[in-house]
């Protein structure tokens, strides 16, 4: 009897875990979608992807956030991942209007114009660091990833827009004549070619460019935004005084006895082994990275300002695997 009960509980929890990973925590779903878009473009064109860039905008004295950048030897893709649902139309002022299933209407900035501004800021940032790129080196794409999105014809006529159906075609078949704008890309790939030295320099610039902070959740979700602070008991906060963006590059949580805890047959300690990777500011630093190990309560809160959300979100240490910080 007990054995049968254990089998039932195990099957239930495995099914629940699979369902969670498939449907995803809504908190980290957008981050996973952006990662998938970048990886799909990378499989199609090769190169290297850079995510969640946080590029200083000297004109506005602020920052421009870019979802995904893909660098190949012949072009630089600047990608915006759009998760809007419902009918998408363009207003007289150029803004996009989203009509939801309940009839409500929301106004959004024109994603194509936004992406063009971001590409200009990125080009200026790269130029300040020593490389001036030709205009046709940039390839801009706004990718609709929500199956419920219905962009009107005026939206789809913008060559930078990839509809959900086109995106699904691209995932299955790669770039081809069935997609708008890919013939132009193929043409430019033939004539654009960077020297190895310039390509390496550009890779270094993008690799060391500012990024948003990132949280990787235990359910596979990815949360992008800005880390604000920790909240918890005094003992934990004292141990975490070291964890400042200027000193720590990454915090990784190791949750004890994951199998037994997953099956629900054993309550694990409320302490989580946490490893902090220290920053090394030495130029061309090599060798083993310096790390600090501390034990923290699993209910310690990480206060995080998620991208595109006004109110800070509180996550518990037991929910995450990695907190990556940009200095």
Image (spheres, helix red, strand yellow):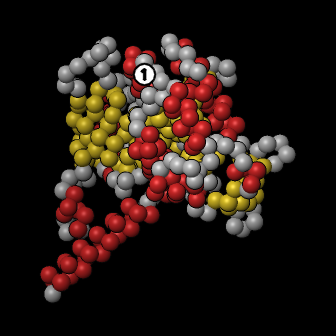
Q: Is residue 265 above or below residue 31?
A: below
Residue 31: where, in percent of width, then height?
Answer: 47, 47
Q: Residue at 32% of width from left, 23% of height from top?
A: 279
In the current view of this chain or complex, which residue is farthest to the bottom? 1
- Left or right: residue 162 compared with residue 289: right
Q: Can the viewer see residue 230?
A: no
Q: Of residues 116 and 27, which is closer to you in this image? A: 116
- Left or right: residue 73 compared with residue 107: left
Classify residue 310 by image quadrant: top right
Judging by the rendered image, the residue that carries numbered circle 1 is 199
Q: Residue at 14% of width from left, 81% of height from top?
A: 3
Which quarter of the rendered picture does the C terminus lie within?
Answer: top left
Q: Of residues 203 and 193, which is closer to you in this image? A: 193
Q: Residue at 36% of width from left, 56% of height from top?
A: 219
Q: Is residue 309 above or below residue 119?
A: below
Which quarter of the rendered picture does the N terminus lie within?
Answer: bottom left
Residue 64: where, in percent of width, then height?
Answer: 59, 30
């Amino acid at each position: 009897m007990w054995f049968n009960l254990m089998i039932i509980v195990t099957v239930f929890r495995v099914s629940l875990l699979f369902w969670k990973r498939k449907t995803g925590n809504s908190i980290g779903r957008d981050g996973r979608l952006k990662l998938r878009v970048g990886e799909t473009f990378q499989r199609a064109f090769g190169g290297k992807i850079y995510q969640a860039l946080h590029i200083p905008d000297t004109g506005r004295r602020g920052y421009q956030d870019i979802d995904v950048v893909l660098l190949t030897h012949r072009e630089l893709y600047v990608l915006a991942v759009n998760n809007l649902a419902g009918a998408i139309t363009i207003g007289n002022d150029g803004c996009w209007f989203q009509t939801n299933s309940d009839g409500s209407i929301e106004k959004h900035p024109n994603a194509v114009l936004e992406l063009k501004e971001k590409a200009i800021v990125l080009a200026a940032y790269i130029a300040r660091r020593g490389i001036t790129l030709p205009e046709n080196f940039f390839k801009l794409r706004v990718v609709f990833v929500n199956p419920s999105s219905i962009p009107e014809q005026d939206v789809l006529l913008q060559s930078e827009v990839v509809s959900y159906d086109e995106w699904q075609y691209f995932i299955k078949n790669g770039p081809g004549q069935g997609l708008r704008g890919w013939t132009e890309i193929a043409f430019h790939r033939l004539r654009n070619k960077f020297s190895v030295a310039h390509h390496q320099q550009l890779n270094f610039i993008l690799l060391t460019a500012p990024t948003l902070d990132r949280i990787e959740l235990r359910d596979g979700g990815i949360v992008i935004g800005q880390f604000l602070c920790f909240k918890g008991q005094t003992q934990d906060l004292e141990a975490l005084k070291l964890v400042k963006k200027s000193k720590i590059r990454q915090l990784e949580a190791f949750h004890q006895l994951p199998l037994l805890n997953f099956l629900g047959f054993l309550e694990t300690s409320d302490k989580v082994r946490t490893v902090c990777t220290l920053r090394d500011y030495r130029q061309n630093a090599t060798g083993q990275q310096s790390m600090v190990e501390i034990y923290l309560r699993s209910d310690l809160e990480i206060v995080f300002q998620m991208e595109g959300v006004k109110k800070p979100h509180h996550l518990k240490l037991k929910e995450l695997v990695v907190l990556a910080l940009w200095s």
